Image (spheres, grey):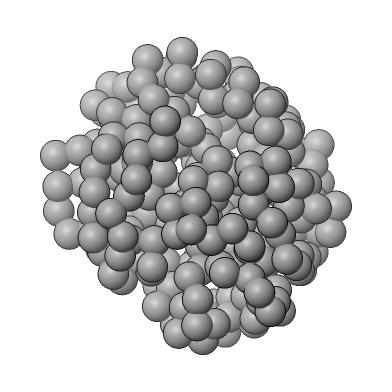
Amino acid sequence: MTALGFLHPGHCAEDDYPRIEQLLAGGIRVDLVRADPAGEEGAHPDASLRLGAPHRLAAGVEQLRLSGAEAIVWASTSGSFTYGREGAHEQLRTLATAAGMPASSTSFAFVHAARELRAARVAVAATYPAPTAALFAEFLGAGGLEVTSVHAAGVTAERAGTWGEAEVLALARAADASGAEAVLLPDTALHTVACLPALERELGKPVLTANQVTVWEGLRLTDRRVNAPGLGALFRREPIVQV
């Protein structure tokens, strides 16, 4: 049994994680702990900066250590990329030191997952307002990816958490651009796991979503290779361990 630990901002779509655990078909335990509940995740970058502050993240670390987690992932995209690439690296160094285990975040998971799929050109379908979506695109660019288009829906995490398959499909279609090799949906508040197969059929290319890549990143950190076609193209390849 491999135990993966996830610090979650506590905004919507937490139920994607037990669904992913079921689709992984045994041998993987997904432990989800909410980061400091005094934190807040919002569309504005300042809110995400407050949410990702080290003292807030440290609040959930001990619980994950006691659960037997072998790796920890900060399951918030905006709570990491808004720090910029160097700031997000420092955030992870602090988290790994506090946890005493490998650590990563959803933002870095997107970069690693796109590389795994050899998707150098990506489109971004964000629920965020335009300035926040632009920061995510900058983060991807700093990671060596070319962003072909950015669509910013400008809705709150709470609103995004109520969206069903039709709204998620519309968001992805709005961002898809000619030449993009994958479409990225960065908001962890979106329920996307149940509609991943439909998204990839609709767009005819790999789709990477926040909760999907977050769990994949935990597997990558523990060097586990899991084939789970129901979780999209990313899980139909053997993960390559990134150094």
Question: Is 150 situated above or below 175?
Answer: above
Q: Quadrant of residue 142?
A: top right
Q: As displayed, is residue 134 above or below residue 68? A: below
Picture residue at 39% right of the left edge, 61% below the top: 234
Answer left or right for 147 relative to 191: right
Q: Residue at x 24, y 26 (%)?
A: 68
The quadrant of the rendering that contains the C terminus is top left
Measured from the top left, where is residue 67 in percent x and y? 26, 28
**166 over 59 or under it: above or below:** below
Q: Is residue 179 visible?
A: yes
- For residue 241, side relative to residue 189 (left or right): left
Residue at x 17% of width, y 59% of height: 25
Residue 209: where, in percent of width, then height? 52, 61
Foreground residue among 8 and 183: 183
Quadrant, the N terminus: top left
Q: Classify residue 171 by image quadrant.
A: bottom right
Comparing 98 with 111, the one in front is: 111
Task: In this rendered view, identify the residue nearer to me: 57 or 91.
Answer: 91
Q: Is residue 80 above or below residue 182?
A: above
Q: Which residue corresponds to the image point at 63% horizontal and 62% vertical from the top-left? A: 121
Q: Is residue 228 left or right of residue 212?
A: left
Image label count:
0
Q: Position of residue 52 (x, y in %)?
A: 64, 31
Q: Residue furthest right?
A: 131
Q: Is 242 left or right of 156, judged from the image as shown?
A: left
Asked if residue 19 can be seen in this view, the reply is: no
x and y, in percent, of residue 86 in the image: 68, 26
Nearer to me, 47 or 206: 206
